[in-house]
Image (tube, grey):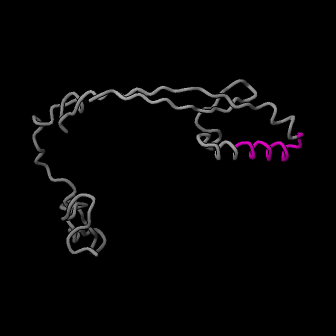
């Protein structure tokens, strides 16, 4: 597997206090030209709402740019339970034999002070694949 390198140009908003915001400003993206045009409109609207002359207010902001080089070097493929990746040896962990959320301890009162086992569905797990619909569901 060969390493790959890419270059991107990022634009950031230089604030009046000297701070540069590269990805977003007040939860607004700065990544695309349309995003940056929207930011200019927001700053103009802010100047208007605050009673400042638009040109005087917006002159306090600038765009700055930088080139970012990204180098990706693939290091290999690992088994799902590889100790180097997950940190523990999953093959030595034995299954716990305790019952989990089976409903065996669920009770409901049939009269004050008299608790009876409820009609439980056996817990939260249903038959069917993980992430899919259980058999017989619509």
Farthest residue in the top direction? 18
Position in image of residue 129 (x %, y %): 21, 60
Vertical position of residue 99 compared to residue 86: above or below: below
Quick one: 109 or 66, which is closer to the camera? Answer: 66
Say left or right for 53 vs 117. right
Q: Main secondary structure of the magenta part?
A: helix
The residue located at (30%, 28%) in the rendering is 2
Quick one: quadrant of the N terminus? top left
Is residue 27 one of those drawn in magenta?
no
Vertical position of residue 77 compared to residue 38: above or below: above
Position in image of residue 113 (x %, y %): 28, 68
Query: Which quadrant would residue 94 be assigned to in this image?
Result: top left
The residue located at (63%, 44%) in the rendering is 28
The residue located at (28%, 70%) in the rendering is 109
| Total numbered badges shown on the rendered structure | 0
Position in image of residue 78 (x %, y %): 20, 33
Position in image of residue 45 (x %, y %): 80, 47
Quick one: 71 or 91, which is closer to the camera? Answer: 71
Quick one: quadrant of the C terminus? bottom left
Region rendered in magenta: 39-53
Say left or right for 95 vs 77. left
């Amino acid at each position: 597997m060969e390493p790959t390198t890419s270059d991107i140009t990022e634009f950031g908003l230089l604030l009046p206090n000297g701070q540069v915001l590269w990805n977003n400003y007040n939860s607004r993206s700065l990544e695309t030209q349309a995003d940056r045009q929207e930011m200019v409109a927001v700053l103009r609207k802010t100047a208007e709402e605050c009673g400042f002359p638009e040109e005087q207010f917006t002159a306090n902001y600038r765009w700055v740019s930088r080139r970012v080089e990204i180098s990706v070097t693939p290091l290999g493929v690992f088994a799902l339970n590889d100790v180097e990746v997950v940190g523990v040896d999953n093959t030595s962990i034995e299954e716990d034999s305790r019952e989990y959320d089976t409903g065996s301890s669920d009770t409901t009162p049939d009269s004050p002070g008299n608790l009876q086992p409820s009609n439980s569905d056996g817990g939260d797990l249903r038959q069917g694949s993980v992430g899919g619909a259980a058999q017989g569901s619509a």
